[in-house]
Amino acid sequence: MFATRVARTPRHIVIPTVSIRSLSTETVTSSGSEPPLPPPPKHLAVPKPSPARSRLNPAPRPITRRRPSFPTLQLPPSFGRNQILPVADSTRALLEDIVSKFEAPIRYAFAYGSGVFEQDGYTTANPASKDGPMLDFMFAVTHASHWHSINMNQFPGHYPLYSRMLGSSFVSRVEDITPGVWFNAFVPMKGVTIKYGVTTVDNLCSDLLNWNSLYLAGRMHKPIRIIKDDARVRLTQQVNLTSAIRTALLTLPENFSETELFERIAGFSYAGDIRMLLPAENRGKHIHLISNKILPLIRGQSIYESCRRICYRI
């Protein structure tokens, strides 16, 4: 049975011609009359591969834009105009010229003392003369260490040797000690001798509002010439003047004169000043300043009107 084979005819698969032509490709020439083919749908478009980016571990935080925690302080132009005391044009030009020489950014600056406002007890009021008084400045800055770094590079001779060796960070740490002021004294500049103190705006405004040490606030109870103004300091200075008036009224008797009122205001800072015990300090100069500089500004007004003009004049 194994020797017998059945010869079978192989089968051939026949594919219809129509099917073969449907699977074949033909070259079709487009004529000008036919419209162009539409673009492929967007969902079928193959996305382009994004460029390779380096991966950092840990990955950097995304940038977020934060709004300031407090709005920018804007005051009316006439607010605090009682703080502006007039000086001679030559003195004003000299003060502004000196402050402009500092490359470090100063937010608020004022000048004070006998070199700015004429006082008794000095042979001459000209600060450029040999026996003339020293010009006193106070600068309020934003960052003390940064400011002293720039200023120490520009004016190294203004600082003593030990502070230059220890650097601006040491100066800023010393400045943090109450009352928060660093002084450079006996500095020759523009043909005169100056002394300038450096503090921060935060420390200045805190003392003006809270009387922490009364060092800066008490100094600003008396006449000053503002050279560079700042809205925040102007507002807190107005609060400082209001507090001085109210405190003086609470400590005075029922009947008092205008001179007694302003002498009491000047005495807030002078009463605790150890320099008043030294013979080198002119103990009568604050009386002269009050009588000859502040009082004429409000002469002819009653006590109530005087207080109201200083406290609420804007």
Image (cartoon, helix red, strand yellow):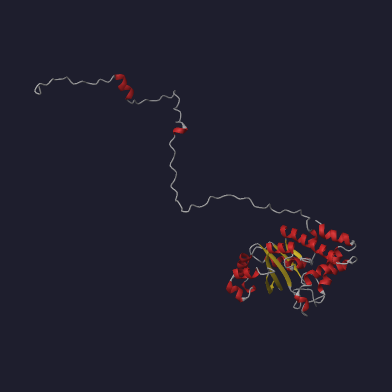
- From the top left corner, tell me how far across and down residue 265 is, in percent: 82, 67
In the displayed structure, 47 sits above or below 269; it is above
Q: Nearer the viewer, residue 171 or 47?
A: 171
Residue 132: % across, % down: 76, 76
Q: Seen in the image, is 130 located left or right of residue 34?
A: right
Q: Nearer the viewer, residue 238 or 27?
A: 238
* Residue 19 appears anywhere in the view: yes
The quadrant in which the C terminus is found is bottom right
Answer with left or right where residue 101 lies relative to residue 16. right
Q: Is residue 12 above or below residue 154?
A: above
* Residue 195 placement (x, y as % from top left): 70, 72
Which quarter of the picture shows residue 7?
A: top left
Which residue is at 82% across, 62% downward? 246
Q: Number of callouts in the render?
A: 0
Task: Quadrant for residue 26, please give it.
Answer: top left
In the rendered image, residue 53, in percent from the top left (x then y), is placed at 45, 49
Q: Residue at x 60, y 67 (%)?
A: 149
User: Can you name the residue that lies furthest to the left here?
Assistant: 3
